[in-house]
Amino acid sequence: MKSLTIVVPSYNEEESLPIFFDVTERVMSEKLPNVDYEYLFIDDGSRDRTMDVIHELAAKSERVRYVSFSRNFGKEAAIYAGLENATGENVVIMDADLQDPPALLPEMYHIVMEEGYDCVGSRRVTRKGEPPIRSFFARMFYKMMAKISKTEIVDGARDFQMMSRKVVNAILSMGEYNRFSKGIFGWVGFKKKWLEYENIERAAGETKWSFWKLFLYALDGIVAFSTAPLVISSVVGMLFCLIAFIAIIVISVKTIVFGDPTSGWPSMVCIIMMVSGVQLLCIGILGQYIAKTYLETKKRPLYLVQESNVEK
Ligand code: UDP
Ligand code: MG
């Protein structure tokens, strides 16, 4: 059994992978020369030469294992496939673009092996180099999640983390289809140490996350790790009932006492618009949860393999 598996989800990373491999090899040979490790590249249905690059690396080094997906299944599926196919006693997940610095590997390995931690997470303490609007929404998301979810989701936490077999098995036991790793990592618990570092910009290529994709991902995270939106819509519903009840009494009394003629068509339209808007919103929220439940009940596989050199 290998001592460490380095899992690298890769989607269209033909430019980054060779650089990633060189830098990581250097760190491993200089700082952790006695560690028996392997790479596990997950090609997430790349459309560029990523798979050719991985083949070249595999021809060059005995340590390179890979799993290639039949199409793009997303990073979450790639992480799951990485953990499932890893043979190492410890596993670390790293991005291919060097935004997760390999220089931290020796320290992480030391912490897991000698300091008695099950897991070492990493978080960036700055977001420099990122569009300000993106940082702003990211901050809001984490603040809100802290309030509405019981699971701890740490601001700035990366998927870059090293974990022992115990933690890997715990994560694999969560077979949910709608995966939100930041939440899953927090949900499983175990003794965890955090390493902090400043944000590093991509080595090559470009980010796969548009603002819209991140927004949808955030919604997935909320639905997966909180049911607070359902509670909020129930509360809003009750509030509206209360307001309506008071309004009925006030208007009835007014009509009886003062004999007020029928009037107020514009205000009526506004009220109808608002109430039906709130209704649609609440149905929408409910729909999100039902949609996720629907996808879960289908029990589709998280990924399909096109090609692999992992022997299990
Ligand atoms: N990635 C993936 N599948 C996807 C999108 C991204 O495996 O559908 C990988 C990507 O190759 C990279 C990592 O996930 O190794 C992080 O992606 P990226 O750098 O684009 O995200 P960012 O760092 O900008 O959040
Ligand atoms: Mg990146």
Image: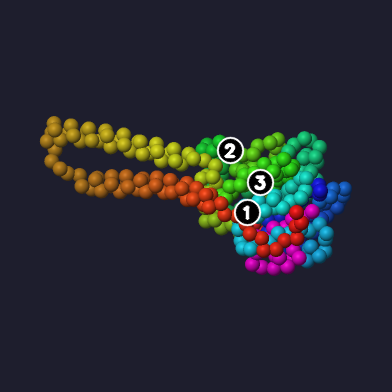
- How far is the residue under mark 3 from the one under mark 1? 11 Å
Q: Residue at 68% x, 61% y: name it.
A: 68
* Span of residues in magenta: 38-55
Amino acid type of the residue tagged 2 in the rendering: Thr
Mark 1 vs ligand 1: CB below 8 Å: yes
Residue 234 location in percent, x, y? 40, 38
Residue appearing at x 62%, y 57% in the figure: 303
Crowding at dot 2, Cα within 10 Å, few <14 / some 14-19 / many 20+, comes out as some
**Vertical placement of 167 versus 59: above or below?**
above
Q: Which residue is mark 1?
A: 77
Q: Which amino acid type is marked by label 3?
A: Leu
Task: Give the left or right position of residue 108, taking residue 77 as reference.
Answer: right
Decide which of 204, 107 is in the foreground and name it: 107
Sooner in the amino-acid sequence: mark 3 or mark 1: 1
Camera-nearest label, 3 or 1: 3
Badge 1 marks a residue whose secondary structure is helix
